[in-house]
Image (cartoon, helix red, strand yellow):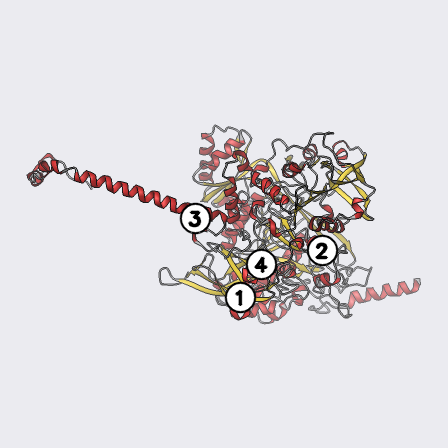
Amino acid sequence: MALVTLWLSILVVLLCGRLPLVGTEPGDSNSSTSPPTAGVPCQNCSQLTLKVEFSTSIVEHEYIVVFNGYFTAKARSHFIGSALRSSDTVDWRIVPRDNPASDYPSDFEVVQIRQAPRQSLLTLQDHPYIKRVTPQRKVLRSLKFNDSPCNDTRWTQKWQSSRPLRRTSLSLGSGFWHATGRHSSRRLLRAIPRHVAQILQADVLWQMGHTGSGVKVAVFDTGLSEKHPHFKNVKERTNWTNEKTLDDGLGHGTFVAGVIASMRECQGFAPDSELHIFRVFTNNQVSYTSWFLDAFNYAILKKMDVLNLSIGGPDFMDHPFVDKVWELTANKVIMVSAIGNDGPLYGTLNNPADQMDVIGVGGIDFEDNIARFSSRGMTTWELPGGYGRVKPDIVTYGSGVRGSGMKEGCRSLSGTSVASPVVAGAVTLLASTVLNRELVNPASMKQALIASARRLPGVNMFEQGHGKLDLLRAYQILNSYRPQASLSPSYIDLTECPYMWPYCSQPIYYGGMPTIVNVTILNGMGVTGRIVDKPIWQPYLPQNGDHIDVAVSYSPVLWPWAGYLAVSISVAKKAASWEGIAQGHVMVTVASPAENDSKVGGELTSTVKLPVKVKIVPTPPRSKRVLWDQYHNLRYPPGYFPRDNLRMKNDPLDWNGDHIHTNFRDMYQHLRSMGYFVEVLGAPITCFDASQYGTLLMVDSEEEYFPEEISKLRRDIDNGLSLIVFSDWYNTSVMRKVKFYDENTRQWWMPDTGGANVPALNDLISVWGMAFSDGLYEGDFTMADHDMYYASGCSIARFPEDGIVISQTLKDQGLEVLKQETAVVDNVPILGLYQTPSEGGGRIALYGDSNCIDDSHRQKDCFWLLDALLQFTAYGMTPPSLSHSKSRTAPPTGTERPLPERLEGNHLYRYSKPQPLNETAPSNLWKHQKLLSVDTDKVTLPNVRVYRPQVRPLSPGESGAWDIPGGIMPGRYNQDVGQTIPVFAFLGAMVVLAFFVVQLTKVRSKPKRRKPRVKRPVFLQQPQQTHTGKTPSV
């Protein structure tokens, strides 16, 4: 055996030393070696799996002051000084920024204010030249590399799905076409490594003479060594950090630059492109928002063509950063960014890759499977009132990709931060092939990439976007391109599975919440544009197009390069009992100013068609219809909403949207497989017809409730609606304990609520004598022969005496968090079932933990429990396994301890929609609720920009009326308004009539005074009075 091992080792060494690399000469001393066999790594070859952890925190006392334009340092200092002097602020200073952008005018300044910061900020914001004041943010990116043999992940592929392996509750029929791992025949493993540029056939364009020449590429990363042998055209290296070095101390920036423009060994896409290296991360992987802003300004000044940003984070409301990205792309900088490494969970897109004007890139392996780490859509900007956009835009190789080593040689990395420079290199190479560079802009490049992408079979659009990068097809499209507008996605087919998941997973029917599809408009004609007139819905009558109603909401201005078209589809009343396919299309005309048109005011126009195809079924019975409450789910950003499972210390933020198509996707799939129809409520409880639904499902709610919502829910349940509530932990002492702490800045983030807003939930259910406690529990247990895990849940503090309550023995996690002590508590009430006493009344079920149906950190699912609760609420069937359970105990009375109260000094009011109305509670508040249902733009979170798509669902039976000028739409509220119009019209007419009567009476009563007025000489003598020196004034 030893001789065999020795012989194999000798053979491997010989092969590694003698086999040439594809694309290199056998005698080239700089050529990298071929891959070794398993367990024997070769020289200059290292296989690393890269894991990126990204977090941000606020820097204490430092603020970014953004101006309305670009000013010199002296002018900026003058503006800030004059504003702060008026507020008597003494202890402040401008933080110096020593970087290459310091010599140029800037549109922001970093100010440190230690005395009376709140009053000083208000004074600054009032200054006419100051646009916005926001906290300075510190960015921390952790790069973790795991060494493994060269061929472990690079060439040997594992046949597996990119989905988690815990999806046991789905049937084969519903889960098969959602799996991204597809059966394939056996194939030979690659014996010789191929560079990613060659795999994508960049060498075909090289042979045509295109190598990226004349294109400026900015790499925002960790720097690059000055004399690295792989690069021949590094035009500039700049340092934007507080470290006095330009070199790369981590190797990540070198790898990214190598994928784009390496000239030897592991060759990049565009070796002749101009590389501009921006070092924006320290060796400790720390950066600040202000560093990025300065570097972005410098990139604009230097007229960069392409910018790669292999970083990202969940904070799409870091306004200075987001605004600057818009400004970059408005200056024709094509930004390519990684979509994130937070997969396979849905709703994990990173910013800025989730922006419409940025090319967001996801990752696949070399067998065209979606990489497990690649983040999934949808975007969460639009929640809770609307629906997310399609992202990523495209996917490409991001697993086991070879690139430049930190000093020399090559290595392999995996991650979307690897896929991003693959696309950035391809974009650079493509830009160099276009003779008329004026045609290349962020929109036209994205149009070419998505139009040429090859769709991966068996993968939905929130995983692959438009498909896999196809370099040669993109070259063909880009070189025959004419400026035009296009749509992403280019069609809506609610029958096409799996690509159109989740739209295709549930047919539509009369009376249901409208299906909202958020389409991105790409405008390749110019940085700004507009929609001419309004989009027009044209039904295909032979294809039953008149059976659906289509309403649209759209961007008033397309800038930069893009906008949105939100399409709301509902079923007409005539199709209440009809089943079939309905089709039609929406016509959209986009106009942009013509830059080179000699005619003043000339415009370029482009008309695009959006085909629509849907499947309609008869309205299902009420018992099968479940309404998911999305309106009361909040997420980070803008506030600090902590994770529901406190054990997950490395993931402290709840940022996935809490939507049935993001982190509750598995639960949605399970309910569909059980025959339930699940709809989303993106408006207050006052805005839906409860008689249409069997169960209202409220999970992990963080939002407050309007008084009218509480009253309406009580009436609805008395009339037969049922309610299921999955709560989470809430304890003010624990909230103070789990503050988000940054050791470097010594800055604390206080949670705005717990895992759920238990005090608000208690207000909602108190009318039935129910309440949750502030207890915090965890532990394993068995219920109805199912293994369960309670993860940071609360208990039931109060429940009606004739209800069913199930208790379990759990650990007191609150005591562990507060005092690091362990205690076991018996008879903790966690589940309650109750039949309301009114005739025909609904049923209520409470459970204290939502983690068992949440994909984020679920350990053991409780979908069986959800099934049992729906059987109880929809059909009144109490599961015997629960009603006769040994764990059944007497309902708690709530007298043992006080109910939880809201944390004093919390900032939930900044993000809560009901809060301002609760303060005054006007008597006509019910009508204001109807207004909220009409236009959700009025109830969006603070600082969310109005041109982001915020779509509100239409009420059942309502026709499309979003195009009506002024935003007045049919509904109960507007009917009330319409009834008052005749009254005001009558009163106005009476006032006008009275005025004329009075004037007529005066005229008729003046005959006796006419005699002195008939005397005309006075008028004739007026010219003779000009000697007084007075002249008429106009």
Disc 1 versus disc 4: distance between alpha carbons? Answer: 14 Å
Looking at the picture, tell me which residue is in the foreground, 722 or 651.
722
- Measured in 3D between alpha carbons, the distance from the residue under mark 4 to the one under mark 2, in whole angstroms, is 23 Å
Residue 192 location, x and y as percent? 75, 67
Q: Position of residue 782 (x, y in %)?
A: 82, 45
Read off the residue under disc 1: 545
Under circle 3, the secondary element is: helix
Q: Is residue 270 visible?
A: no
Question: CA gap, disc 3 to disc 1?
Answer: 31 Å
Q: Amino acid at mark 2?
A: His
Which residue carries the number 4 mark? Answer: 510
Task: Give the CA distance from mark 4 to mark 3.
Answer: 26 Å
* Relative to 900, residue 211 above or below: below
Check disc 1: other Cα within 10 Å, few if <14, some if 14-19, many if 20+.
Answer: many
Hey, which quadrant is residue 570 in on the image? Answer: bottom right
Q: Nearer the viewer, mark 3 or mark 2?
A: 3
Front-most of 52 and 25? 52
Viewer-proximal residue among 448 and 959:
959
User: Considering the numbered disc 4 on the image, is that residue within a helix, a strand or a loop?
Assistant: loop
Of badges 1 and 2, nearer the viewer stands 1
